[in-house]
Amino acid sequence: MDTHTISLSGVHILIAVGAVMMVVGFLGCYGAIQESQCLLGTFFACLVILFACEVAAGIWGFMHKDTVSKEMINFYDSVYDKGMTDSLSMDKNKEQAAATVLKVFHETLSCCGKGQGTAILTSITDRLGITDICPKNHLQTSCHQRIEELFSDKIYLIGIAALVVAVIMIFEMIFSMVLCCGIRNSPVY
């Protein structure tokens, strides 16, 4: 399985997750507006399933953080190669999506290049105006090193983000069940 297939699979997974979240959000909003026990109960059930999936994914990710780190580095390498090829080509009409993703990688992680040599090469091409990929301060830090640091030294940040999402989901479940029970016990119906 090549990196292009892996990145397309990742895109398809993200699209599917977004579609599921849109349907779940619709169930919650429409169920609250219509005061429908059925829709709110379905919303609650979907939230429980999503919460269980989030916990399972978090545990799997923590247990396999080295594998995830290696896959992220492989993804970065493929984007770097594609972005540099597109930026160095003389056809400026080409879509440069890979170069844009690469620039976001570099600005977010404050790094540039796959290693020391590629960081220097990219900085030189940026200074000459051939490419515009590295951050403006032309950092010489390898992105491989930053990615490994993210998944080893700063794993707690990812854990905190997952914990915040989990707490929000718990509150959503509580509020949807309270609303559902309130509708059931309402004397109007």
Image (cartoon, rainbow, N blue to C red):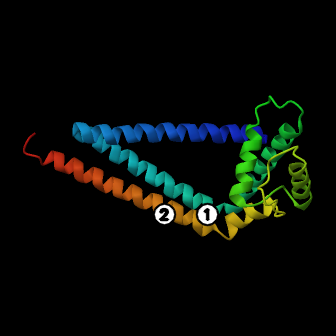
Residue at coordinates 81% horizontally, 42% vertically from top-left? 83
Amino acid at dot 2: Leu
- From where the camera sits, is residue 80 visible? yes
Circle 1 residues within 10 Å: few <14, some 14–19, many ≥20: some
Whole-percent x and y of residue 182? 17, 50
- Which numbered disc covers residue 180? none
Whole-percent x and y of residue 15? 56, 37
Element assignment for label 2:
helix
Q: Is residue 164 left or right of residue 5?
A: left
Residue at coordinates 56% horizontally, 61% vertically from top-left? 59
Whole-percent x and y of residue 63? 63, 63
Circle 2 residues within 10 Å: few <14, some 14–19, many ≥20: some
The quadrant the N terminus occupies is: top right
Q: Is residue 67 left or right of residue 85?
A: left
Q: Nearer the viewer, mark 2 or mark 1?
A: 2
- Which numbered disc covers residue 163? 2
The quadrant the C terminus occupies is: top left
Amino acid at dot 1: Phe
- From where the camera sits, is residue 68 visible? no
Whole-percent x and y of residue 171? 35, 58
Residue at coordinates 23% horizontally, 53% vertically from top-left? 178
Residue beneath disc 1: 62
- Pick the residue in front: 169 or 131: 131
Distance between the Cα atoms at labels 2 and 1? Answer: 13 Å
